[in-house]
Image (spheres, rainbow, N blue to C red):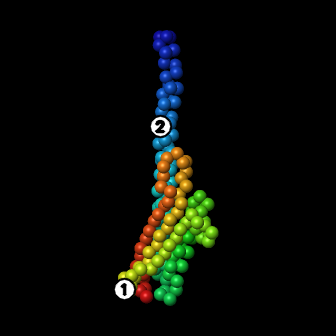
Amino acid sequence: MRPLQRRRRGSNLIEFALLLPIFLSVVAVSFDYGWYFFMRAIAQNAVRQGCRAGAVVPPDDDAEGAASDAIASGMNSHNFFGIDCEAASESRCGITVSSSGSSPEESLECNLQLEYPGMTGLIPMPELVQVRASVLYELQR
């Protein structure tokens, strides 16, 4: 029995060394894509709520400005990677809001482009989180 144990002594270490990179890759992919999809869901929710906030303002008010402010404040409540969407100097957070169509089908279109730097940098990831929402005005102009 004794000689058989000596021959298997280092096999566990070799198996661990061979499987460790694969395990770390799976963990890195899980973290990166999980965070990306979480960030995208938060951005989509902020754009949807911001666009809705702009669509319910009275016709004489600035709907585009109200929607843009609501989107920026919705994104700032989570503070991703120190990106401040409400700051005028922030270039990593692009919010565009525009009106299209005519009454009775006038709508407000909201877009958000947000840089995504990635968490681990070990795998290729999309560089931008892009979300879009379109809402009909509550009170047509």
Crowd tier of the residue under label 2, counting other residues whose Cα lies within 10 Å: few below 14, some 14–19, many 20 or above: few
Q: Is residue 125 above or below residue 106?
A: above
The kind of residue on which mark 1 rests is Pro
* Residue that label 2 marks: 22
Separation (CA) of disc 1 from disc 2: 57 Å
Crowd tier of the residue under label 1, counting other residues whose Cα lies within 10 Å: few below 14, some 14–19, many 20 or above: few
Coordinates of residue 132 in the picture (x, y in percent): 44, 68
Q: Secondary structure at mark 2?
A: helix
Give the residue displayed 48% in from the left and 49% down from the top: 124
Coordinates of residue 27 in the picture (x, y in percent): 50, 43
Q: Is residue 25 above or below residue 66?
A: above
Front-lying residue, 128 or 76: 128
Q: Which of the 4 image quadrants contains residue 104?
A: bottom left
The kind of residue on which mark 2 rests is Ile
Q: Secondary structure at mark 1?
A: loop
Give the residue displayed 45% in from the left and 65% down from the top: 131
Which labelled disc corresponds to residue 104? 1
Q: Say whether residue 50 is visible.
A: no
Q: Say whether residue 85 is visible.
A: yes
First-in-chain label (1 vs 2): 2
Coordinates of residue 141 in the picture (x, y in percent): 43, 88
Q: Is residue 49 above or below residue 80?
A: below
